[in-house]
Amino acid sequence: MIKTAREQELLGAIDPGKIPFHVAIIMDGNGRWAVEKGLSRHEGHRQGVETVRETVKNSSELGIKVLTLFAFSTENWKRPATEVSYLMSLPEKYFKSELPELMRNNVQVRLIGDREKLPRKVQKAVEEGSEKTKNNSGMILNFALNYGSRAEILMAVNRLINDTRDGKIKGGINEKTFSQYLYTSALPDPDLLIRTSGEMRISNFLLWQLAYSELWFTDVYWPDFSKVHLLEAVFDYQRRKRRFGKIQDSER
Ligand code: IPE
Ligand code: IPE
Ligand code: MG
């Protein structure tokens, strides 16, 4: 594919030694993208899957180690049944066509969210995707499906209560212990959060884990999010000063 001038420029300017380890994306704006083009919302979601394919490839090539994609929230069940049902048909299609490519790119698929309440066919598709890619050692592709951060926190609290009752936890609960009870237990917190479509909110996504993430927003709708936008986000990220509450030597 031909690289645009801006893409070339960004590729030259990005420091390969400082790629964010974990990038999380709120993939928003499929519906508006479609409606503005006179298409059905389904078309927006279909195109959104194409952007997922591209973004997975681009992220893995760039050296991102964990990519978490918000695909369906616990609140998205409130949408019309036809839209929910269309969205629930996508994981199966995605894995069917994408597995060979995921294998070629050494990508390991995982899922975060309440899988029990997902239709059986979705559970099966994601479980197969995870199972077949579990020995891949490249980028972790973490799909957030039926994910809600408040529900996740409550799940962790309830499990903690049970384990405390069973005597499995001695002493108090610290941040590290708490993190281990979340769906993301095995993963470091996101370094960079991207949200598309111009909305400036978190929408119940990774509330605990985003405590110190760098946030990057763009007006671009998810179906139009391309490599150049990913590079812009990473380039911007590399120019941020992450203080974690401290001050840097140069600021003393
Ligand atoms: C994101 O696009 C996909 C999901 C939330 C499932 P939307 O469907 O939210 O698109 P808009 O925000 O209505 O444009
Ligand atoms: C957030 O998008 C959820 C996903 C991207 C899956 P929404 O479109 O559901 O968010 P709100 O409703 O605008 O906050
Ligand atoms: Mg939306």
Image (tube, rainbow, N blue to C red):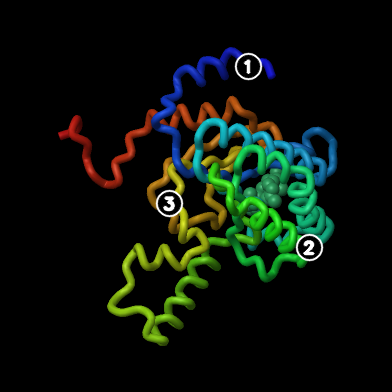
Q: Residue at x 51, y 15 (%)?
A: 9
Amino acid marked by disc 1:
Lys
Q: Which residue is mark 1?
A: 3
Amino acid marked by disc 3:
Pro
In the depicted view, which residue is nearer to us: 155 or 93? 93
The correct choice, above or below, for 132 with respect to 218 in the image is below
Q: Position of residue 207 (x, y in %)?
A: 47, 57
The correct choice, above or below, for 226 with respect to 46 in the image is above
Mark 3, ligand 2, within 8 Å: the answer is: no
Q: Is residue 239 visible?
A: yes
| Residue 32 as seen in the image, left or right of residue 205 | right
Q: Residue at x 60, y 54 (%)?
A: 134
Mark toward the start of the polypeptide (1 vs 2): 1
Q: Which residue is mark 2?
A: 121
Circle 1 residues within 10 Å: few <14, some 14–19, many ≥20: few
Mark 1, ligand 1, within 8 Å: the answer is: no
The secondary element bearing badge 2 is classed as: helix
The furthest residue to the left: 252
Q: Is residue 72 visible?
A: no
Image-quadrant location for residue 173 = bottom left
Circle 3 residues within 10 Å: few <14, some 14–19, many ≥20: few
Mark toward the start of the polypeptide (2 vs 3): 2
C-alpha gap between disc 3 and disc 1: 32 Å
| Residue 70 as seen in the image, left or right of residue 99 | left
C-alpha gap between disc 1 and disc 2: 39 Å
